[in-house]
Image (cartoon, rainbow, N blue to C red):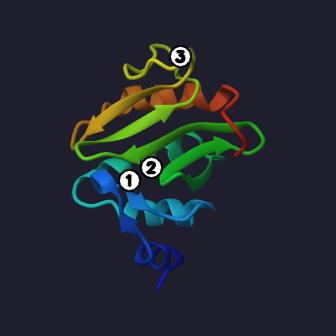
Amino acid sequence: MTSSSKLNSKSRLLAGGNPQIAKADGDAPVQAYISAIPGRKRNVAQRIDELITAAVPDVHKAVRWNSAMYGIKGRGWFASFHVFTKYVKLTFFAGTSLQPAPPGGTTKEARWVNIPEGTIDEAQLVKWIKQAAVIPGWGNS
């Protein structure tokens, strides 16, 4: 049994099908979080993870607040995603600094995009990911 499988076997689903995974750093807890997502939303989450990993090779991954988190060590978190009933919400913590800014949100800095099953604009996501990764992030990663 892989460490991802061990973590996954201890998860439960919260509202909207979001997996409850213990706070942890590294790729293994993020993969456990993704593998616990039910249905086709898992494919959306896997693809988001793949796009971030390819666009930002030195990305630091973690699970916090039952969300997959992505950052640069020592510079903070730049993005996270969380599962809801009808979509996966990808949040950019300094989203108002991105061009164009993602469409969701009214907070001071964060912006997000809700991605329903099977509808990913990969080119736009990669542009946002690359921009977000070079902006000082939120909190500690």
Residue 50, disc: 2
Compared to residue 10, the image places residue 107 above or below, namely: above
Q: Position of residue 20 (x, y in %)?
A: 44, 62
> SS of the residue at dot 3?
helix
**Which of the marked residues, 2 or 3, is nearer the chain's N terminus?**
2
Q: Residue at x 49, y 80 (%)?
A: 2
Q: Residue at x 59, y 52 (%)?
A: 61
Residue mark closest to the camera, 2 vs 1: 1
Residue type, label 2: Glu
Distance of label 2 from label 1 (alpha carbons):
6 Å
Residue type, label 3: Thr
> SS of the residue at dot 1?
helix
Residue mark closest to the camera, 2 vs 3: 3
Check contact, mark 2 vs mark 1: CB within 8 A: yes
Rate crowding at label 1 as few (under 14), some (14 to 19) or many (20 or more) other CA atoms within 10 Å. Answer: some
Relative horizontal placement of residue 90, taking residue 40 as reference (left or right): right
Q: Which residue is mark 1?
A: 46
